[in-house]
Amino acid sequence: MTDLNEQGRHAKKAAYELGMAGSAKKDRALSEIAAVLTEKADEWLSANAEDLKAAEASGMRSSMLDRLRLTRERIDGIVKGVLQVRELPDPIGHVDCMDQRPNGLIIGKKRVPLGVIGIIYEARPNVTVDAAVLCLKSGNVCILRGGKEAIHSNMCAVRLMREALKKAGLPEDCVSLIEDTSRASAEALMHLDEYVDVLIPRGGAGLIRTVAKEASVPVIRTGEGVCHIYVDDEADLDMAADILYNAKCSRPSVCNAAECVLINERVEEAFLKKAVPLLDKDKVELRCDEKALAIVGNRGTAAAEEDWDAEYDDYILAVRTVKDMDEAIDFINRHGTSHSEAIITDNYFKAQEFLERVDAAAVYVNASTRFTDGFEFGLGAEIGISTQKLHARGPMGLQELTTIKYIIYGKGQVR
Amino acid sequence: MTDLNEQGRHAKKAAYELGMAGSAKKDRALSEIAAVLTEKADEWLSANAEDLKAAEASGMRSSMLDRLRLTRERIDGIVKGVLQVRELPDPIGHVDCMDQRPNGLIIGKKRVPLGVIGIIYEARPNVTVDAAVLCLKSGNVCILRGGKEAIHSNMCAVRLMREALKKAGLPEDCVSLIEDTSRASAEALMHLDEYVDVLIPRGGAGLIRTVAKEASVPVIRTGEGVCHIYVDDEADLDMAADILYNAKCSRPSVCNAAECVLINERVEEAFLKKAVPLLDKDKVELRCDEKALAIVGNRGTAAAEEDWDAEYDDYILAVRTVKDMDEAIDFINRHGTSHSEAIITDNYFKAQEFLERVDAAAVYVNASTRFTDGFEFGLGAEIGISTQKLHARGPMGLQELTTIKYIIYGKGQVR
């Protein structure tokens, strides 16, 4: 992988320059990117058409084709996103705190970029631009490795962004694409320790687990979401049904959607009476434990063991009876992916205890898990939702793409 | 490695309990640890004597024997350290920020422990206690894997600490030791992803690189220090000589000691005239480039290529001539380990530029690199000095052993 080494070396060199480029220059690059993607949308659309043609020929299923597809409207949305990122405050250069020590040393913690970020993702061409502009705004260079299905779309988008970077007076190598979409190229990127500071895989659980397992470059795991809603015996059951319906059905393909409802046995029948008619609206398949199945009858099927750990990303819901909140919390801590978990209850003490005891990036009382998202949390943008504990947890915005550097002003101090 | 799996499972269970134990209980455990280590110091000393006897028989060199050795005075020092950690503020439970979103959701970021921390270290029995109490104070369970040379000392210290934990009403499994000191046990710990949240290797560069390379558990790299002092042509040369002498000789075995001085050619002769007599006091060996060698004559020897990347941890200094600050910065960014770097200059603009352009955890103007340390930086304690960019950079105190959890208070919000 001599080429990738070369690409890494160029990226690292560009990172040095980009790290010191001020906000004005970075914002100008973002404006240029928005402009070129608008002006040359036709080029991007026809590159995308090539990908779509190949994908159709290979028999790709329609939901995947839809993810791969660009339209003029979608490009407008992507461009709008670029301009929104441009408007966010620059996280770089902020000194988090600065203090004078007893010996007179003045020590500050200054925000600096991470450096070079590798992004490994699947067949969504919008990620190419989204990820690149978030990296750029936060002073980071990115090396993109997208799926082979989107290779023409990605090559075009990266070529256009590099044009824009050049116009703005920044190194083109601030954004680069690995054009070789073989498995070997992904593996090489996972071991490019010398040049890559962090890898962020974006995509399905399989991709993320593989990268986390194989990479020697540090990885931030994102987006694995087996989220639960626990309906307490002291819950407002109408509210609980609304929240469950929203958490399951408002967008089942995303990681903050609920996959499993845990229902206190004392209210199970009453709750299901309210919830099932809502779930019926989207023909949600119910995979139930014995007790729940006895209630819903042939509206559900018996859950298998693997249903309790499944990330369906689809109109399917696992339904399980629990004796009390303790059992719910134990179940969540064993079967969850530490993403988003919710309790629905009127009881103050249970609410507080659930918040305390559930081990997840986001723990909710009386709200839908669907809110776990950089925009909803007020970060202004999001590169992913970290389900690990190191570096960042939960939605990752621009701040999470930075690190710090201690700067120390002395006047001859020795120790 | 069934046993280690079992140990991991117990650790994870203990982490759940410890994470919710309040400060009072954790502080009581720290008091009990200090008490038992004082009361039963003899037991610890005789366990240590066993290790020392075996080490001597195996021909361990005296500097290593010294690291392995416990004395009553050293135990007093360790106990004092435990009590100091007890007095630090508890980082857990603090809500970094809490805000109400436009939809009424109240979202806060609460500090929580990382969980289970694996510590892999060498033959210093003090690390066993130091690391355990820092983990404990920050609500983290630790699994310790020390060097085989210190196994009796470590087994004794861990047994005593577990006694203390029990007395304080906390699970004994908050601290545990891997008693198997084979290479296989270290490797198994590096892959105990299911139970271990982070690995912190403490020791020499070889150990750290091996762990970073092999582990699938996330690692925080610490303590690799090839630090430089750049003496500018506009430096106060007396100050520069004092700082260099301090950075090299005050404690050469530690990671924040300087390994290489870069001297602006315009002041090289004058500077060396001042610095060499100081370095003579400790018989510092000088490994010089051609120009420096021409100045110091037979006081130095010619540096080999590997000297420019060497972490000597000894009374040896690499001496290199540079044309200007640009060359110094390039050299540092290529050959440094991103630990601590210093410029000595009177020039305001160069000082600011050096702070900006050098990529390291701590960048100094006119002060010794020896200050990079949790105590000196005011963190109160230190588990190591991170030389990576993810999660933590520079000295790691209690705060760096935590992560966050988003807590969200709703009243029925759906998206």
Image (cartoon, coloured by chain):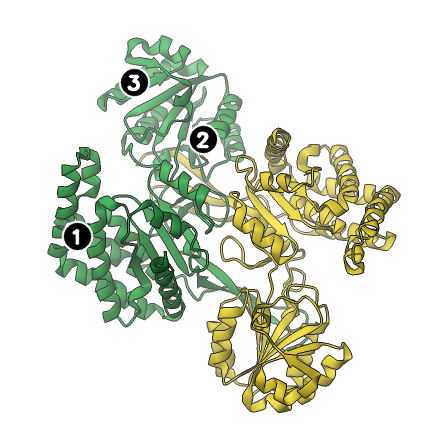
Chain colours: A yellow, B green
Separation of disc 1 and disc 3 at Cα?
Answer: 38 Å
Separation of disc 2 and disc 3 at Cα?
Answer: 23 Å
Q: Are marks 1 and 3 in contact (CB under 8 Å)?
A: no
Callout 1, which amino acid?
Asp
- Identify the residue under disc 3: B276
Q: Quadrant of the N terminus of chain A?
A: top right
Location of residue A166 in the rendering, given as x and y in whole percent from the top left corner = 75, 32
- Which disc, if any, is residue B76? 1
Which of the two labelled residues, at mark 2 and mark 3, occupies the earlier sequence position? 3
The answer to which of B292 and B344 lies nearer the viewer is B292
- Subunit that carries the residue with mark 3: B
Location of residue A95 in the rendering, given as x and y in whole percent from the top left corner = 52, 46
Q: Residues within 10 Å of mark 1 (few under 14, many from 20)?
A: some
Callout 2, which amino acid?
Gly
Q: Quadrant of the C terminus of chain A?
A: top left
Callout 3, which amino acid?
Val
Which of the two labelled residues, at mark 1 and mark 2, occupies the earlier sequence position? 1
- Which disc, if any, is residue B336? 2
Which of the two labelled residues, at mark 1 and mark 3, occupies the earlier sequence position? 1
- Subunit that carries the residue with mark 1: B
Horizontal side of B219 relative to B311 (left or right) equals: right
Separation of disc 1 and disc 2 at Cα?
Answer: 36 Å
Q: Is residue A333 above or below residue B286?
A: below
- Subunit that carries the residue with mark 2: B
Horizontal side of A392 relative to A371 (left or right) equals: left
Q: Residue at x 30, y 27 (%)?
A: B245
Location of residue B253 in the rendering, given as x and y in whole percent from the top left corner = 29, 34
Camera-near label (2 vs 3) is 2
The answer to which of B400 and B166 lies nearer the viewer is B166
